[in-house]
Amino acid sequence: MLLTTYLPEPSDPSLLDAHITSRPATPVGIVVMNLGTPDQPDAGSIRRYLKEFLSDPRVIEIPQPVWQLILRGAILPFRPRKLVEKYQMIWMPEGAPLLVYSQRQADGLQQRLDPTGQHVKVELAMRYGNPSVESAVDKLRAQGCERILVVPLYPQYAASTTATAVDAVTRYAAKMRNQPELRFIRSYCDHPAYIKPLAQSITTYWGAQGKPERLLLSFHGLPRRCAEKGDPYHRECMLTTAALRRELETTGVPVHAAFQSRFGAERWLEPYTEPLLRQWAKEGVKNVHVVCPGFLADCLETLEEIKLMCRDAFLEEGGQDFAYIPCLNDDAEWVDGLAHLVREHAAGWLA
């Protein structure tokens, strides 16, 4: 059988644009992505957020049929109501702190990279909740972006944070016929663009409030078995600690690391933040400052768990002065650093 190939005539515009001779210039898209937050500080919004967040198999590494029974039967019916008052306590007039500060970072990044938006378009996405990953990618594609850099707001890589952000973007791209070119920032745990603004924010705070006896870096926790299976999160937290210790060496303040937000009965990364603070107070340490380097925007885990609960624990055991140093949030030096990271990872894309 003779096989022939059909080539459309140039006169058929629906099949061939013969007049196009070069690729048109298109803007570069940037997706700034954070974890997520409930839309409102009410039980219904919190329940929807927790259901999406805790149903991710990278977040809860328990066989899904078993975990879904626990989640739907023992957590979602009760936990959201208990969290309402806590979320209401930290809520800002513009919304959830994590969303507000993440949006300010995205807006600041747009201003530093391209204020007019002709060559660079920046959109914010939340891995869980709103604005969704899909909506952010759709907005960039609608503005002509054929190249997209995804910037997770997680300095330290973990499968339960950075990897699931990559999963979400690539899963959505897998549904597209015309896919954009994608790049991802994996981590920047000891990059000067992140470490130097963090150190500057701490020394600025000390300039106004005085230095403590000890500085505690409180990272979000992770089950120990995750590290044993090869997750690099613990190592990257230690790299952050070492880099920050070097930056603050001349201050004379000892820098320690611990892990917060334990959940369940299994062993997590140690030492645990609250027990360590209690131990220090019992040993006679009177003045402690805590900062949370794994969070780039304040949220429930920093403003309620650390600023309030850990403060109370330290004072209960005899401590006298406890201070929580805010996250980088919309700090100008940090947004400059974020722009530096983007330029570095978008090399060849940005002028």
Image (cartoon, helix red, strand yellow):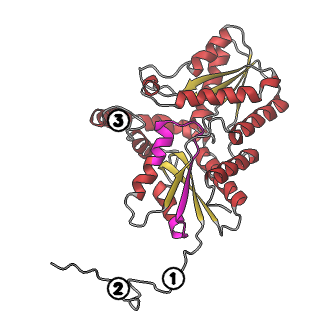
Tell me what residue is drawn at x 74 percent, y 27 percent. Answer: 246
Identify which residue, 160 or 315, lies in the foreground.
160
Q: Amino acid at mark 1?
A: Ile
Tell me what residue is drawn at x 66 percent, y 8 percent. Answer: 282
Label 2 SS: loop
* Residue furthest to the bottom: 11
- On the image, numbered disc 2 is attached to which residue? 8
Identify which residue, 287 or 269, lies in the foreground.
269
Image position, residue 117 (x, y; %):
66, 67
Tell me what residue is drawn at x 64 percent, y 48 percent. Answer: 101
* Mark 2 crowd level (few <14, some 14–19, many ≥20, 10 Å Cα): few
Identify which residue, 127 or 231, lies in the foreground.
231
Disc 1 to disc 2, C-alpha distance: 15 Å
Label 3 SS: helix
- On the image, numbered disc 3 is attached to which residue? 71
- On the image, numbered disc 1 is attached to which residue? 20
Which of label 3 and label 2 is nearer to you? 2
* Residue furthest to the front: 2
Q: Quadrant of the C terminus?
A: bottom right
Tell me what residue is drawn at x 41 percent, y 56 percent. Answer: 172
Q: Amino acid at mark 2?
A: Pro
* Residue furthest to the left: 1
**Whether residue 45 can be seen here:** no
Q: Which segment is the magenta one?
A: 140-166
Q: Amino acid at mark 3?
A: Leu
Label 1 SS: loop
Disc 1 to disc 3, C-alpha distance: 55 Å
The reply, left or right, for residue 203 in relation to residue 119 is: right
Q: Quadrant of the N terminus?
A: bottom left
In the rendered view, tell whether residue 252 sits above or below residue 82: above
